[in-house]
């Protein structure tokens, strides 16, 4: 596994150092982001989960003479996970555009796609490497990109580390081959490290990576509901459509809602199934599963300690509740069955009628 993560780290460094025209990189001030509070909140170690999302992407000129282009964004996020630094890749391209975006006559946009997270913030720096490409649409290049996207999507934004260790090498090889075809043109790229140790601290934020921003005053940029806007002289906020850009965000939350995707969740389902049987033997099995579940949850690198305690408390209450309901159902079922005397009288009546 370590070898794959090292290759991912090397690939991220290589991608970020490509020969790319110097872009504009703008961190939008929190007071210029709406609604209020959508940026600028402190991210605390071991308490918050962080996520990286592509909120707004525009390829301003999707057609150039007889060539048609699709946008592709390569994102590598590096952070501390389970006591070591790892890199998680993400590829955003035409295949996702057909699902989450829109195709316009003069451009292509994509909205609100999570590329990493949620992950517990374990301290240290979080490094984000991002490169915006335009891909000339030829059958072989487009087909390979769809394959690469498929592998990246299978890993998912929250990145199953076991799956990443198995297919990460294939993803790197596919990307290296694809980027070497000559049909992929880098437009803009940058790398940034975010850390609570820096003077500005580690805060939720919106940032824009902009290619060909001549004539665009980045001081006039605004974010409204996750969309990049430009403040005109008359005060009106207008869409930013004069350049190719990627608007991305770093967000934080105190809980994650996808615990059912984590490896230990099957133990909870097994414990719940046994608790719902209502008999003493099954309850013992449920209790044993809960003990094992507790160990895995407390030690899980995917959960903060606070949410681990909350989950265990909620799951234990659910198991007890289901066990008590099952016991009541069993008692009601036994009470509904006729007693011995009743069954004998019923049998005698039947024999009397038949004779």
Image (cartoon, helix red, strand yellow):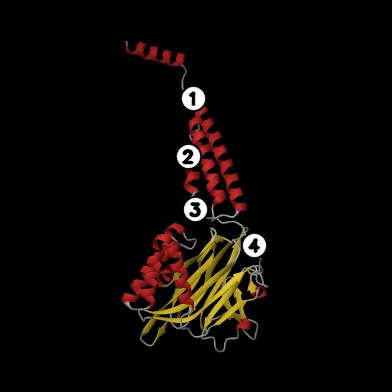
Q: CA distance from mark 3 to mark 1?
A: 39 Å
Q: Of callouts 2 and 3, which one flags the residue occurring earlier in the amino acid sequence?
A: 3
Please tell me whether mark 4 sits on a helix, a strand or a loop. loop
Please tell me whether mark 3 sits on a helix, a strand or a loop. loop
Q: CA distance from mark 2 to mark 3?
A: 18 Å
- Asked whether 139 or 171 is in front, the reply is 171
Q: CA distance from mark 4 to mark 2?
A: 37 Å
Residue 334's disc is 1
Picture quadrant of residue 179: bottom left
Residue that mark 4 sits on: 44
Q: Given this view, does label 1 or label 4 mark the residue nearer the observer?
A: 4
Callout 1: few (<14), some (14-19), or many (20+) C-alpha neighbours within 10 Å?
few
Q: In the image, is residue 259 above or below residue 11?
A: above
Left-right relation of 70 to 81: left
Look at the numbered discs 4 and 2 and tell me whether their residues touch, using CB distance below 8 Å.
no
Residue that mark 2 sits on: 273
Look at the numbered discs 3 and 1 and tell me whether their residues touch, using CB distance below 8 Å.
no
Q: Of callouts 3 and 1, which one flags the residue occurring earlier in the amino acid sequence?
A: 3
Q: Quadrant of the C terminus?
A: top left
Q: Given this view, does label 2 or label 3 mark the residue nearer the observer?
A: 3
Please tell me whether mark 1 sits on a helix, a strand or a loop. helix
């Amino acid at each position: 596994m370590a070898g794959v993560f090292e290759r991912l780290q090397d690939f991220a460094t290589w991608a970020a150092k490509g020969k790319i025209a110097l872009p504009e990189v703008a961190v939008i001030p929190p007071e210029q982001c709406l609604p209020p509070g959508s940026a600028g909140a402190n991210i605390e170690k071991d308490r918050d989960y962080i996520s990286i999302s592509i909120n707004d992407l525009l390829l301003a000129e999707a057609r150039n003479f007889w060539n048609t282009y699709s946008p592709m964004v390569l994102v590598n996020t590096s952070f501390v996970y389970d006591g070591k630094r790892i890199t998680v890749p993400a590829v955003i391209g035409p295949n996702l555009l057909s699902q989450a975006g829109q195709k316009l006559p003069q451009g292509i946009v994509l909205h609100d796609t999570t590329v990493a997270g949620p992950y517990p913030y374990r301290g240290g720096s979080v490094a984000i490497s991002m490169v915006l490409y335009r891909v000339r649409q030829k059958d072989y290049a487009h087909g390979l990109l769809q394959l690469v996207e498929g592998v990246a999507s299978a890993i998912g934004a929250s990145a199953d580390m076991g799956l990443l260790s198995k297919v990460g090498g294939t993803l790197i090889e596919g990307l290296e081959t694809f980027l070497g075809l000559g049909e992929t043109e880098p437009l803009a790229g940058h790398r940034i490290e975010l850390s609570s140790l820096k003077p500005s601290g580690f805060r939720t934020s919106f940032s824009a990576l902009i290619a060909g921003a001549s004539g665009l005053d980045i001081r006039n940029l605004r974010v409204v509901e996750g969309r990049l806007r430009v403040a005109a002289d008359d005060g009106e906020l207008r869409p930013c459509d004069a350049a190719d850009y990627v608007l991305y965000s770093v967000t934080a939350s105190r809980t994650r809602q996808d615990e059912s995707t984590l490896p230990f969740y099957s133990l909870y389902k097994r414990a719940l199934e046994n608790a719902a049987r209502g008999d003493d033997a099954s309850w013992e099995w449920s209790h044993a599963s809960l003990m094992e579940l507790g160990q895995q949850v407390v030690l899980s690198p995917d959960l903060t300690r606070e949410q681990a305690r909350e989950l265990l408390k909620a799951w234990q209450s659910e198991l007890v509740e289901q066990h008590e309901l099952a016991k009541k159902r069993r008692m009601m079922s036994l009470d509904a069955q006729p007693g011995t005397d009743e069954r004998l009288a019923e049998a005698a009546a039947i024999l009397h009628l038949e004779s």
